[in-house]
């Protein structure tokens, strides 16, 4: 979620993999970085969660399931085996 002069918004992916800017009403913060969205999106919509700063309405995206991005350097297999 981002904030503009018009208020909080998110980017929602459309069927052609372009994004649309959507005003939302934020709710309570959950578990650190998670935020409840009270209104502005539907349960079946796909929301952009990373890379929003590079987007504008109509931008094309290459969607990936959340959590599949490459880990930061130094936090790959070696870090996992050390846990």
Image (cartoon, grey):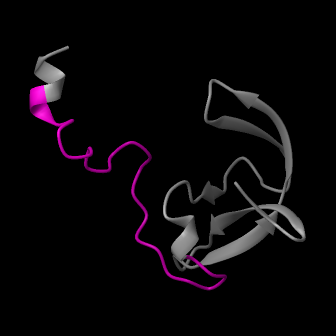
Quarter of the image for residue 33 reads top right
Q: Residue at x 41, y 50 (%)?
A: 65
Depth check: 22 or 75 in front? 75
Q: Residue at x 77, y 52 (%)?
A: 42
Q: Tell me if 5 is positioned left or right of 48 in this view.
A: right
Q: Is residue 71 magenta?
A: yes
Q: Main secondary structure of the magenta part?
A: loop
Return the x and y of residue 4 as percentages of the image width and height.
81, 68
| Residues rendered magenta in the picture | 55-78
Q: Is residue 74 above or below residue 7?
A: above
Q: Tell me if 77 is positioned left or right of 54 in this view.
A: left
Quarter of the image where the N terminus is located: bottom right
Q: Is residue 44 magenta?
A: no
Q: Is residue 7 above or below residue 34?
A: below
Count of numbered circles in the view: 0
Q: Is residue 16 above or below residue 3?
A: below
Quarter of the image where the C terminus is located: top left
Return the x and y of residue 7 as percentages of the image width and height.
88, 63
Return the x and y of residue 70 as percentages of the image width and height.
25, 49
Return the x and y of residue 40 as percentages of the image width and height.
85, 56
Q: Residue at x 21, y 35 (%)?
A: 75
Depth check: 56 or 12 in front? 56
Q: Residue at x 84, y 56 (%)?
A: 24
Q: Tell me if 53 is positioned left or right of 1 in this view.
A: left
Q: Residue furthest bottom?
A: 58
């Amino acid at each position: 979620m981002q904030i503009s002069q018009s208020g909080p918004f998110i980017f929602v992916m459309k069927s052609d993999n372009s994004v649309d800017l959507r005003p939302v009403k934020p709710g309570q913060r959950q578990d650190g970085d998670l935020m409840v969205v009270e209104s502005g999106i539907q349960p079946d919509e796909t929301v952009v969660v990373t890379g929003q700063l590079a987007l504008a309405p109509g931008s094309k995206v290459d969607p990936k399931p959340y959590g599949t991005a490459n880990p930061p350097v130094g936090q790959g297999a070696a870090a996992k085996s050390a846990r």
